[in-house]
Structure formats: structure tokens, C-alpha cells
Image (tube, rainbow, N blue to C red):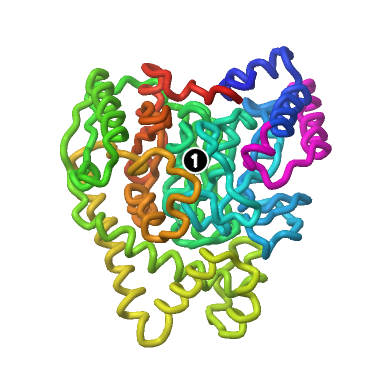
Amino acid sequence: MINRSLKELGAALAEKRISSVELATLFVERIERLNPTLNAFITVDKGKTLAMAREADQRLASGLAGPLTGIPLAHKDIFCTEGWLTTCGSKMLSNFVSPYDAHVVSRMKLAGLVTLGKTNMDEFAMGSSNETSFYGPVKNPWDTARVPGGSSGGAAAAIAARLAPAATGTDTGGSIRQPAALCGLTGLKPTYGVVSRYGMIAFASSLDQGGPMAKSAEDCAYLLSAMAGFDPRDSTSLDRPNEDYGRDLEKPLAGLTIGLPREFFGTGMAADVRSAVDAALAEYRKQGAVTVEVSLPNSGLSVPAYYVIAPAEASSNLSRFDGVRYGYRAPEYADLSDMYCKTRAQGFGAEVKRRILIGTYVLSHGYYDAYYLQAQKIRRLIANDFVEAFRHCDIIMGPTAPSTAFAVGAKSDDPVAMYLSDIYTIAVNLAGLPGMSIPCGFGEGNLPVGLQLIGNYFEEARMLNVAHRYQLATNWHKRMPENL
Ligand code: GLN
């Protein structure tokens, strides 16, 4: 059961081969056994989980169930969950029991998914290794001396170790795709505005986007279809018709043009990542796709631009800390007061403090034009690069991360080295495009490698189709870590 796809789990539940209570119990018991080693969950509540599973069983018995009813799901602890502790990986929220559900959480409940718990994450989603969490680092199930990636590292470790069939994640600069790559999973960041940010604690509001993390593209299609949709409570939520993101999964790929950005295939990529990515591209050519070189000439500026824009937005979000408790809110309070920094800063970890200082500095009088405005102009150039590239291809591919999972502690004292973990993912957030990571092999030390797919705006269904066809021909996504 622990290796089954969501479709298979749905069928097993519908045919009464297993009950939702039995299924939830199976995962809860794995969490009890393995979480002390992995630290993937911050909060589990067996009583609440089983109560939801019992409700799902009633729904299944009454014939009112949907395809996901009764399947367990973990939520990243950035999503407000009514009656559950919601910490965002921070001491600042260590006693915050949310009085309401994030939009994503209510959508998942509506679909009948059963909440397994809240997963560990970098504090306020700032990080690429899960080492900044107030609740301690998460271990990568493929090698517990290594990081799972971040910031959705708890979600990634949980799925990789089969403590949960799937999870929600968020991606501001790579936080769904990079941990998915480092843990051998499939993760999708939607087009900005497709998934509501209501009740998703803000990091950088113009970049943040929630999305699914699971074992396969097919699983992600089911989850995204349940999660996406217009929500008037998020002013950037897009009012578009609901989609079945799995509608094109099976379409053959003959005639597909894959763009390979010259800038993504340079010296930055480790040799083992490179050979796995090359082999994946060969598989796509075998299926009838053609590859063409494209260029994203400004992508080299994406990390510096991001580390002006994201901290600027984060510092204004965190400065109205009481707003943080209620997830996304309109920016009523724009000031960054000294008093706030002095009285609140003690509660934050070192990385969050660093971001607040950078953000406050780049927004301050006299520096705003030189840094913040400049970064916004670069952001536009980066988005334009993609518009041009998509005139020559249907989808863009490259590595998700420059290396496989690195050792715990290897980059924690070197912020710039850490920030470069997202060198291939950040431009996608700056442009607001959809992106995915899918497992495409193993590198040195039997560590997973991720292939990144970048679609044009609103082309999630196409991207999932391209990912699914690869997963029909390969088994990388079915592997799980041994010795667990
Ligand atoms: N690693 C990046 C950062 O630290 C991105 C994090 C994210 O996507 N939430 O900001």
C-alpha cells in the first residue's frame, strides 16, 4: 500500500479493499516509527487524523466520494490548518493554533483527503536545506547524513520515506522543485495565481505559490485539480475556469519541441547531474521530441534579483507580524519600524534575521531605487527572456538543482553557496511560470537527480503530460530508499 499511486489508493478505497481508517493507521504507524530519525513532521495528531478518516469512510459508504476521498495527505506547516498547530518552522509561531483553514487546506478537505500532520520546513520557508527550522533539521531518507532540500524538505522526506502518499508544498524560489529533486520525487509549482495563497503564511507574496508534491506526475495532476481554483480572498488569485490537469496525461510526445537553455548547461552543473539529465533528454528524443537550444540571457541575474525582491517582501510581511498569523493579508502596514526589529527579532533564527536586514536595507530611503527598483527591472527582463524562448519551443528542460543532496552542515555557514542551490529554479518564480521536477536517475552515492520542466503560462496540463510520458517509460519515480 505504501508504494501505491493515488489512483490505485482511490480504487482500493472505492472497492473496499482497505478503509480510510486502515490506510491512515498504516501511515501514522510509519510516522511513529521513522519520524524520530527523519524529523519530517512537526505535528501529528492521531486522534484528529483518524476522525477525518472515519468521516471519509462514511462518505465512501454513502457513494458520495470523489477520486481522492479517504487518501491521507500531509500539509507543509506553512498552511494554516484549523485546530492544528501551524508554526511555519518558527519559534515565533510555536504556540499558534490556527483558527481557520488555508484555501488549499479547505480544498483538500472538500476532496476528502485526510490530514496526516504538518511537515517540517525552513523557518518561514527561507532556506534550501531545512536546516533553518526551529524544530531541527530534516534528514534525507536516501542518506540521513544529507539534507532533503528546502524549504519543503519535511514534505519531501515524508513522501520519499513513504510516511505520506503525498503532500502540499510551497515554492517561492524553488522550495517544491529542489526538495523534490533531492528526495527523488515529483513536485509542481503552478503558474502564479493558479493556487490561492489565502492562509498560506507569506514569505514573498509576489513569488509564493502552493503546489503538490508526490511520487508521480499522475498523482500531481489529481492533487492540482483539487487544489487550484479562484479564491476571492487572495487578490492575486486568477478567475479562470477549473481544469482537469490530468486530461492530457497520455498524449504521445511526437512533435514536441524541447528548449534547452544554453545558460543551464554550463559549468555549474555537477557531472552526475549532467549525465542523468542528458540520459533523460535522450529518452524524450526516443519518444519523438526534438530538442533545440534556447537562450535566457538574463538568467544569471535571477539569484541576485531574487535576493533583493524576496527579502524586501519578506521584511514587510514579517514586520506586521500579527498579520503573519493570519496568512496573506493586503499590505495595510507598509512601515518597517526599528521598534519592531528590536522587539521581535530575538524570536527569529539567524537566516530570517539576515533576510529582514537585507530587506529593510534595500527598501530604505536612498537605496530603494538602486536596489529594489533595479531588481524589479531585471525581473521584467528575465520574464521577457522566457517569452522569447517559448517562441521556439513548447517546453523548457534542464536540471532542477546543480548537485544531488549535500551533507548536513556543508553550506549552513555560507549563505551564498546555499542561495546558489536555486540557481535553476528562481527565474521561474520571477517570471511567474509553472515548473516541475521529476526524478531522472541517480548520481554518486545513489542519490536522486531531478529533471526540471518549465512550461509556458497555464500549461500545467501539458507539462504533466510531458512528465507522465517519461514516467511511463522509466522507473526512477518508483524507487524508494532501502533500509527504512
Ligand atoms: N531557497 C530559496 C530561499 O531560501 C527559496 C525558498 C522557497 O522557495 N521558499 O529563499
Residue corresponding to mark 1: 146
Residue 97 sits in which quadrant? Answer: bottom right
Q: In the image, residue 399 lies at what x, y percent?
A: 32, 39
Q: Residue at x 23, y 53 (%)?
A: 385
Mark 1 surroundings: few (<14), some (14-19) or many (≥20) residues within 10 A: many
In the depicted view, which residue is nearer to us: 383 or 235? 383
Asked if residue 193 lies left or right of residue 30, the reply is left
Q: Residue at x 52, y 24 (%)?
A: 480
Residue 262 sits in which quadrant? Answer: top left
Q: In the image, residue 159 lies at what x, y percent?
A: 57, 33
Asked if residue 388 lies left or right of residue 454, the reply is left
Q: Residue at x 24, y 23 (%)?
A: 282
> Is 46 a magenta residue?
yes
Q: In the image, residue 308 lies at what x, y percent?
A: 38, 68
The type of residue carrying mark 1 is Arg
The magenta span reads 34-63
Magenta residues, dominant SS class? helix
Q: In the image, residue 448 lies at what x, y percent?
A: 42, 31
Asked if residue 482 lies left or right of residue 384, the reply is right
Does residue 112 show up?
no
